[in-house]
Every structure is written in structure tokens, then in C-alpha cells.
Image (cartoon, coloured by chain):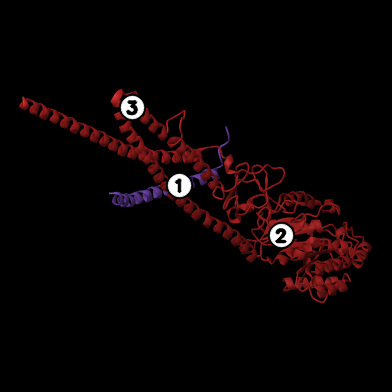
Chain colours: A red, B purple
Amino acid sequence: MPVVYAVAFAFGAALVLALAVLAVLAVLLVLGLTAVAAVVGAAATAAFTVVFVVAAICRAWVAVLRDDEHGHLMAAPPDPLPPGRDPGYVSYVFGPAWRDYALATTRGAAQACDRTVRRGRQTSRSVLDILGGIWRFPDGFEAWTGVVGKIVFGGAVFGGLLGLAAGGLVAAAFLGITTATFALLLAAVIGPMLLLTAALRVVELAGLRLRGITVECPSCHRRVGVPVYECPSCQDLHRTLVPGPLGVLVRTCRCREELPTLLVRGRSRLRSHCSHDDCRGVLPLGGLTVPTRHVPLVAGKVAGKTVHVMAAIADLRAHSNGTGPEFGDEHTRTTFEQVEKQLEDVAAVPSTLPTAPLRAATFFHGTGSARRLVYLYDAAGERYQTSDDVAGLRFLGATAGVLFVIDPLAFDPVRTRMEESDVVLPMHSTELPDGVVGRFTAGLREHGGRSSADRIPVPVAVVLTKCDVLVDGGPVRHPYDDLGEGDDCRAARSAAVERWLETTAGEGGLVRQLHTDYERIGYFAVSALDVFGTTDRTSTRTGRAVGNDAPSAPLRWLLGTEGT
Amino acid sequence: MSAPPPQSIVRGRRLVASLLVVSALFGAAAVAVLLVWLVPLALDAFL
């Protein structure tokens, strides 16, 4: 019997031992499974977290960059009223890029949050939702399997939470490094662009200053720093069309037309206006590309200024084979075309009204480095009647040369002898030029800040007009009647007209006063009737061939382009 | 439906997109290097 008990005890003990071993193995198995589940859960969750976060940010960026909606950029031009900044879009890199970045980052962060830690989402489950599902998965198991399941799946959830934190850290590191790199790259682009913007403005201004290029308003006669440019598509006005926050090389107008911001890229081909709010006159097309030369025509009433200036322009066109000069603005072209027809009957050219706005005729003259934008001021004779009137002429400050137009029939000795010989006289001035010249000279001194003791360095062309009357006949000799064969040079012709004024017209006082006031004077004898070709004509008085100066000769002499 | 942005913004966005791709590639490379460097250190500390 004791043997039986002993065997039974041994069997029992072995059984208990076996069961204990099995239990230990089972516990170890459960713990092992739990550990494996925790590791797998951590790794998988970390990977999913990183992928979800990165994918959310990428999707947000792609959506923002492809989105037609751009209100958040605040780049659109303001409403036209009240007047604010220029009607152009802000350059993308000067602000809107950062706003896009902020929007994409905000959206990306929200989406990353949705895909990782937000609970109860309707559309798709977050990482935390999935972990919650894993935790609840064993709830349906029976008895001990439920307990074992809770332990194993609990391990997986625990690992998942750790993985979520680790993945979040890795994603944060990725986003942080990417953000910093992007910011540096964007700054590396914007910084040089800012420098380039400033450099382009400085270079353009310096180039204009060095070449002495300016532009003045033909209407108000004031200097214009930066013209107001007009969009050729929508006619909106851009007051500061220069490299800046609205564009470095080009600016996008409200109407989406791209406008060049630099003169070398074609800004000067845009129609432009005076920058003064009380004027807004149209500036010459092509302004700020060449230096300007301002030439006033000075004379008394009915001296023939308008006819002379238009004859001079017509003559310049004839000299350039009909290709030039190029008109600076539509107003000059229209006026010229009207007067050109009237030149066939000089008497039909109407007098310039003293009440009419004094707008300069503008045209380009010369070629290459000698090309100039010429402003001709054909002010009505009435504007030179008083010193106050003359002092109010703003263009005197920029005057580069003066055309004194003198009607020979205004001189009593000339007119009287002609009338006594029954010569039919054309319309003529009755005002002696001395007064006009004196008032103009005083005004020029005042605007130039010169004392009366100094001679004015501005060249003066004294133009004796209507010389066809002197060629055709009558008792009064033509200034060039006495020129010999070898005296056909400019100096001899100038001296001949000067002598004529002193001796024939009795204006020695005028000549002396001019020489006292001005450093450089040229005298010319012209006739507007020569506009269609200056040819020598036989004087009916002397029988000798006499040729007037070309109508454009005084202007070319003033501009220093006599050979052109 | 709003009008598409002007070409200047489209061009700018292309530039920014290329900068972003470069930044992302750099960020990924930097994180990979960090992990390769940090994980062995962490394992050494814990094991």
C-alpha cells in the first residue's frame, strides 16, 4: 500500500509540477505575446504617425499651391476708391509666399491632428481611434481568453501609445528641419531680390542722373520725378511703376496685364502722365530715354512764331527723308498736321490764343547719343506783355536755347519804305521786339538766379522771319544781298543779319543789348514759304540769287545738330 | 468660382514648391541621420 501511495503522490506531484510548468509557460507565452504586441504596436504606430503627419502636410501644401483661391494672400490690388496704393498685385515672394506657408502649415497641422490624436472623426479613423479599437477588440472573447486578450492587446495599445509619441517626435523633427530649411531658402531668394530691387532702382536713377536725363510736363512745365504710367489694357494709373514690392522686373496690373518696371525693359513705351495731382498732363511717349532740350519761341504778337515752329518741324522732317522727327505726343502730331495743311496759305494760320493752355510741342531730334527730346514753347505774344507774365513761365528754369522771332515788318524804317513802294505786305507785327526781349531776358535771369552783370550762357537764335518779302522785291535789301561767293558760311550769314538789323532796321540798340545779355548769339534769315524746299531765288531788286536759311536752321544750330 | 491667380503668383508658387521639395528632402535626410545616430545611443543606454 505504501508503494501505491508513493506512486500516487509521485504522479500527483509530477502532475502538479507539469501543471505549474505549463502555467509558467502560459504566463511567459502571454507576456511574450504582450511584449511582441507592444513592440509591433509601437513600431507600426510610430510609422503610421510619421506617414500620416507627413502626408497631411504634403496634401495641405499641394492643395494650397494648386488652389485658385488666393484671397488669403492679400496680394490683390485695392479697390480703386478711395485712392490707395497702385492697382497692381503684390509680388508673390514679398509677403504672399509666407501667407501661403502659414495657411499650408495650419491646415497641415489640423489634418495631422485629425489623422493621429483626434477621437470620433466621421470620415476616417485616427491613430488614437485605431488604438481604442484594438483595446476593445478582446471584449467579445469568452472567459479566460478575454483576460488573455486584454493583456496581449493592452500591450499592443501601450506600445502604440509609445509609438504615437515617438512618431510624433520624429514627425516634429522632420517638420521642424524642413520648415527651418524652407525659411532659409526663401530668405536666400527674397534677400537677393530685395537687394536686386534696390540696386535696379539706384542704377536706373544713377544712369538718368549721369546722362542728364529728365522729363518735364509739356502742360504744367514742371519736372516730373517718376511719371504716372497708364496700363495699356485698362488705363488704370500706376504712380510708382518702379522695381518694388509690386514686382521687381514686371508688375501685374489689376487687369492682369504685365507692365515693365524698368525703362530698359520698355517702361518708356507706356503712355505716361504728369505726377502732379493738379495737372496729370500727358507726357511725351519715350520720355526718360534721352535728355530734354527746352526751347521757347519769343516774339511779340503776330510775329509768326507758330508758322515758324511748324515750318521748322516740317523742314526737319524733310531733312530726314520724311522719317522724322518723331513726335513726342499725339497733341504735337495733331497740331502739326493741322498747321502743315495751313502752311500752303500762311495767312490762314490762326494766331495762338493767349487764353489757350501753353502746351509745348515735343519731338525727338538727332540720332544715337545726340538724340534729344525737344520741347518747343510757342507762347502767345500776349504772354510776354508784362514782367509778371514772363516771371510766371515755369519753363524758363529749364531753357536750353531761345528762338527770338523777329518780324522785319515790325520795324518802322522797313515797313514805311515797303508801304511807300506799294509792296503788298502780309500780316505783320506792330510791336518792336526790344520790350519783349528785355522782359524775357529779365525773366530768364530771375529763374536762373543770375545777376544782371553776368552774360547768360543760354544760346540765342535771332530769327528774322518773312524774308521772302525781302527777296521778292521792294526797296529794302535782303540781309544776304551783299554776301559774296565765299561768304556762304554760318558766321558770315550771322554777321550779315546782324548788320541788317543795325543798319537797315535801325535796331543797333537791340543788337548791343543782346550781346550784353547773352554769351552766344546766332542770326538767321528765314521764310516759312521755304518749308517745301529752300532754293535760291533771284532778287527782283538786285537781280542776284539770294537764299534764305532753312526754316529748321536756327533750331538745329541751337541743338548743336547743324550737320543733320 | 473665383478667378485663377495671376501668372506672377503661379510662377512664384512654382518657385516656392521647388524650394519646399528641396527642404523636404533635406529634412528627411536629416531625420534619417538623426535616427541612425540616436537609436543606437538609446539602445546602448537601455540595454
Q: Quadrant of residue A145?
A: top left
Q: Nearer the viewer, residue A350 or A288?
A: A288
Q: Can you see residue A548?
A: no
Q: Amino acid at mark 2?
A: Val
Mark 3: which amino acid? Answer: Pro
Label 2: how many residues lie within 10 Å, few (<14), some (14-19) or many (20+)? many
Element on which disc 3 rests: helix
Compared across the picture, whether A425 is left or right of A231 comes to: right
Compared across the picture, whether A316 is left or right of A357 comes to: left
Query: How many C-alpha atoms fall within 10 Å of the one at disc 1: few (<14), some, or many (≥20)?
Result: many
* Nearer to us in this view, A393 or A112: A112
Q: Element under label 2?
A: strand
Image label count? 3
Q: Position of residue A351 (x, y in %)?
A: 85, 53
Report the residue marked by disc 2. Answer: A374
Res B20 label: 1
Residue sticking out furthest to the bottom: A453
Q: Mark 3 sits on what residue? A: A138
- Are discs 3 and 1 located on one and the same chain? no
Question: Label 3 marks which chain's residue?
Answer: A
